[in-house]
Amino acid sequence: MYSNKLINKIFGTLAHDMNYYESIYPKRKEDMVVRFAPSPTGFLHTGSLYTALINYKLAYDNKGVFYLRIEDTDTKRTVEGSLETLREQLAYFGIEYNNDPTYAPYMQSQRKDIYNACLAYMLKNGLAYPCFLTEDEIKDIRTSQEAKGERTGIYGAYAKYRDISEEEAIKLIDEGHPYVIRLKSKGDFNRRFKICDLLHGELTLPENDFDIVIYKNDKLPTYHFAHAVDDHFMGTTHVIRGEEWITSLPIHYELFNTLGFKMPHYLHLDSIMKQENGNKRKLSKRKDPEASVSYLIELGYPKEAIINYLLCLANSNYEEYFMASKNNDTHNFKLTIEKMSKTGALFDIAKMSSISKETISFMNINDLVARIEDWSEKYNKDLHKLIVEDRAKFKAIMSIGRNDANPRKEYERFDQILDKIKFFYNEYFNQMKFAMPYPEELVAKAKNAFLNISFKQPEADWTLMLKEKSHKLGFAMNKKEKQELGLEYMFGDFMKIIRILLVKSDNSPSIYEILNILDEEEVKRRLA
């Protein structure tokens, strides 16, 4: 146990003690209070978005609270501008957080007084101690432990300063020796405790016996200590995070009990996995571009598509709901823990693209055009130029086939659009090439016949007239007629000739709809 003399030496005069913070942070009224607590250390990882989405959705579905806390105590890894990007991307995906000022501040770097009060409580009660082990000493301890086949870390006899006197600690501080504060663990690694995980069920784990660092020499708390303090005073009821934190549960279990705090419920989400060479591995920031949310946005996956796909990973029955609803409203779907994966959800870019096709087909045409315009302004200047020069034309192009009984689903991502529609625009069409696989004489006959039929009439009538005209030229109406009469070509070949002339491709949307977007003079020019 240490007195205020040492505590003041470490922290200066404390603004308040721990009881003060117990009095100013009221108990939450809601049954579910969850948080997303990222570090501003770079881009938003797809797995982090997945975690944020599940926290947000469970809070929404259960009339709870979802808040955002920034864990910025690791100053060495902080990336300038990443916090702003993080907030922008959460807003972009419609993940709204409620940071009630009653429980502020929400930046860990602004909560030092709270941490210091709790650290002082632990020092006063013999639950923590200042440790002056140097990096070289810690390295030597580790080397010795490895040589003996022991667990590596500071515990038991290796905790050299565990019982340091107040006088000796003050002397070393005055002499300028760097130090940290460590938990004075009361755990026994050979004992087990039980804890319930809401997804994985009851877990039996060894107690923590490491004297872990809880206060670094940069005057900031470690993640473990801040987790216990923040989630207690901010009223978190459920901690929903990645499965990689299961191994830290013994530490968190001891810290909450040591501080006299009620533990929250835990739910550890399985990692998003990727298939590689027949094996599963975690989606990696270094190896996989799709691990970055920014990359998916840049490709032009609509935000709704990304959310829809992540919800498919989260709950096995979401895809059925999504396909039946034929819209992108996720609010009527209730996320359940029982339907979550326990073996690692597999990130499949092809499946995501399929979901994205459906998502785009469900979007209102005006919203879709506006979204593509916004995206292209940042990521595809050539497409953006075409849109702003003639929005009505672009809307007409994007409307092709959308109102059919079986709507056309051509686009997976916005970055595919320009290549698929460029034939509508002369500056691109004039540079396109496609070999005509039919004889010149046949092509000439087909062109003349086609130009003699006006497309300014109902599509059914226009199609019937084309069939009659092509039949007179010797194009069979069906395979049976082709075989019986020994004809070489069918009506499909007739339309293929026209399609190649009009769009420089043998694959395109409805020719009739294309004609009604191109003006008559342009149609004649292309068929000349």
Image (tube, rainbow, N blue to C red):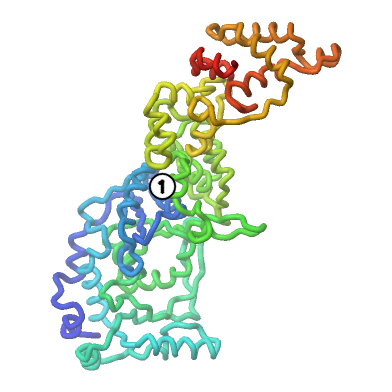
Judged from the image, the secondary structure of the residue bearing numbered disc 1 is helix
Q: Quadrant of residue 508?
A: top right
> Quarter of the image containing the N terminus?
bottom left
Q: Residue at x 39, y 69 (%)?
A: 252
Which of these two is toward me, 226 or 208? 226
> Quarter of the image containing the C terminus?
top right
Q: Which residue is mark 1?
A: 58
Q: What number of labels is visible? A: 1
Q: Quadrant of residue 384?
A: top left
Q: Quadrant of residue 466?
A: top right
Above-or-below relation of 209 to 231:
below
- Local packing at callout 1 (Cα closer than 10 Å; few below 14, some 14-19, many 20+) is many
Above-or-below relation of 286 to 172:
above
Rendered location of residue 12, percent (x, y): 15, 78
Residue 201 appears in view: no
Rendered location of residue 259, percent (x, y): 30, 72
Residue 189 appears in view: yes
Above-or-below relation of 81 to 436:
below
Q: Residue at x 41, y 45 (%)?
A: 57
